[in-house]
Image (cartoon, coloured by chain):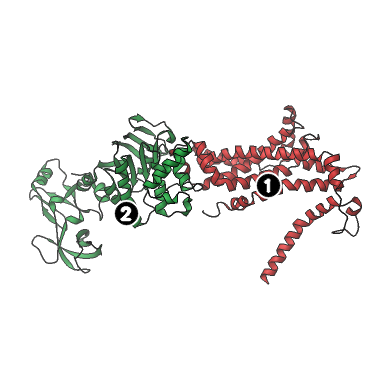
Chain colours: A red, B green
Amino acid sequence: MKRLLRYFAVAIALLTTLAPVYWMMTISFKREVDQFALPPRWFSFSPTLEHYVDAFVARSFGQYLLSSLIVAVCSTVGALVLGTLAAYSLARFRLPRNFDRKLGLWILSTRMFPAIVTAVPLFLIMRDLSLVNTRLSLIIIYTAFNLPFVVWMMRGFFAEVPRDLEEAAMVDGDSRLGALGRIVLPLVAPGLAATAVFCLIVSWNEFLFALVLTQTDDAMTLPVGIAGRVTQYGIKWGVMSAAAVVAMVPILAFALSVQRYLVRGLSLGAVKG
Amino acid sequence: MSIAVFNLTKSFDSSTVVDHLSLEIADGEFVVLLGPSGCGKTTTLRMIAGLEQATSGDILIAGTRVNDLPPQRRDVAMVFQSYALYPHMTVAGNIGYPLRVRGLAADQIQKQVRETAALLEIDRLLQRKPRELSGGERQRVALARAIVRHPRAFLMDEPLSNLDAKLRLQMRGELKHLQQKLQTTTVYVTHDQAEAMTLGHRVAVMNKGKLQQFDTPLEIYSRPANRFVAEFVGSPSMNFLEGSIDVTNHRFHNDQISVVLSGVEIEKFSRPDAEKRVVLGIRPEHVKIATSQQDGWYPAGVYVTELMGSETFVILQLGAARIVARVPGDFRADLEDRVWIDFDMTKAHWFDVSGRRL
């Protein structure tokens, strides 16, 4: 009985999360007459790829996808490199007057205000740097936004690694950076993978700054591109759904490929190894 | 290579952990830093390794000042209490690591790893990961990693303290054998006086950051420089009886005992500036016990007996004081039994009330 209840709860959860995804996927394969048929055609409709062709051949969604990929990957890598080094320093070095702790809080505090607050100043800065309508502007902003998150996640993971290990490595003849790369990073790899997934998701889904900063087909990312199909002449449900389905794929593929690490990374620190 | 520290001092904020420590360690010597926890012995070792920055003073390796060199350029090897094996590498990877970071060729590394593993009898474990090893095996891997690159010195931080008692004795012997074979200068930190006595050519006893005595184990045991050393070295610990010197009658006496002083002691205590309140120290093996009354011996009650097999420790109640005697294993006595004890005064140690040897 208890088991039955549990399965029921799982079923409800799955239904609520997957139903919209299912609806979106079916819309992307339905002809427009089927999309608005009443009663709704849940299963029986004649599938078509016309919206995919429309989105990626006739329109510039291929371009948006490429921009999204470049921006997400570059900002994730940037945030991981900078954030990991910062987190390692904060985890290992004590500064006078508890300055290291204050520094950590200060880094976190940059995430405490709503993003919209910085939208206008950042737009002005990017305009002055002639970076409006470039992917670089988004890469810089997403890197900055992901940094505090990376620093705080990685600091926790680094704190779990016994100091002895890197001290042993340094006495053994390695430099501190060498010890970080050869000894410490391999040990926090699961944490690194989990952090990377989060960064990637944030960058991939980010809408506000992409909307403010990119209006040309060359620089626009998928979320902005998709939203742009809501026009005063009508809403292109089919094209939007097709693009959304494609937008899901890379993040899903990456998450699945690091799933092994993800579970370990998220529970790292909870259990002493 | 020789190691020397001069006036080495380490302070954290307001507390001084190592206080003007000076030691000279000869090439090939095995020196043990001995002391209770918090005495600064590990900090001293870490300063020699370069893992801790000295507040003041000099550290010399092979005659060259190394204070400003990072650990990787001091060419010393360290064995940690936790072994600090790299969990994601195999045993071969662990042992070969110091060679890899030095950029040796792969076949050269493999050859040296094999030789070292054979020396420590862990060659069949080379493909295992540290988590698949027993405590003793991990210890050997840690040693192999230190030995493989023929460093200028070994630094060992309580390397045996995580092993069970039997294995600890075995590894202690192997460690000593290995050091004698390799003739590499070794600085070894421990709080276990038995390890210090058996392993070290010389032992440096430390307390509260200060060096108490630096000498051979035998000298430390037979002529402790102060009451701290006398009490810390030796198991069971030395007995101490505080009392006064009666110069006119040439006696030392307190509430429980009154002993005649020897000629040397009379001379020592008769000087006009000599202390009148002193502490008599007697090792348990220099306390004699008889079950029948002996002329001039002191009656005492048996508080408890501890059988060790080959010998027995008898803890005696002598007035308000407790005295430990080490007697042969066949000695039998019951609780509260009345016995008579005497001290071998030729083996007596004398300290002033502040603990300084007289």
Relative image position of residue B68 (x, y in whole percent): 41, 31
Q: Nearer the viewer, residue B67 or B120?
A: B120
In the image, A86: left or right of A174? right
Check the image and report above or below for A13 versus B281. below
Q: Callout 1, which amino acid?
A: Phe
Q: Quadrant of the N terminus of chain A?
A: bottom right
Residue at image position (46%, 35%) is B102
Tell me the chain of label 2: B
Q: Is residue B345 left or right of residue B131?
A: left
Horizontal side of B293 relative to A221 (left or right) equals left
Chain that bears disc 1: A
Can see residue B234?
A: yes
Q: Which mark is residue B157?
A: none
Characterize the local packing of mark 2: few (<14), some (14-19) or many (20 or more) Cα atoms within 10 angstroms: some
Rendering coords of residue B74 (x, y %): 40, 34
Q: SS class of the residue under badge 2?
A: helix
Q: Secondary structure at mark 1?
A: helix
Whether pointer 1 and pointer 2 mark residues with C-beta atoms closer than 8 Å, the reply is no
Position of residue A118 relative to residue A195, above or below, is above
Residue bearing the label numbered 2: B169
Q: Is residue B127 left or right of residue A78?
A: left
Q: Which residue bears the numbered disc 1?
A: A254
Disc 2 residue type (three-letter): Leu
Residue beneath the point at 64% across and 37% down: A78
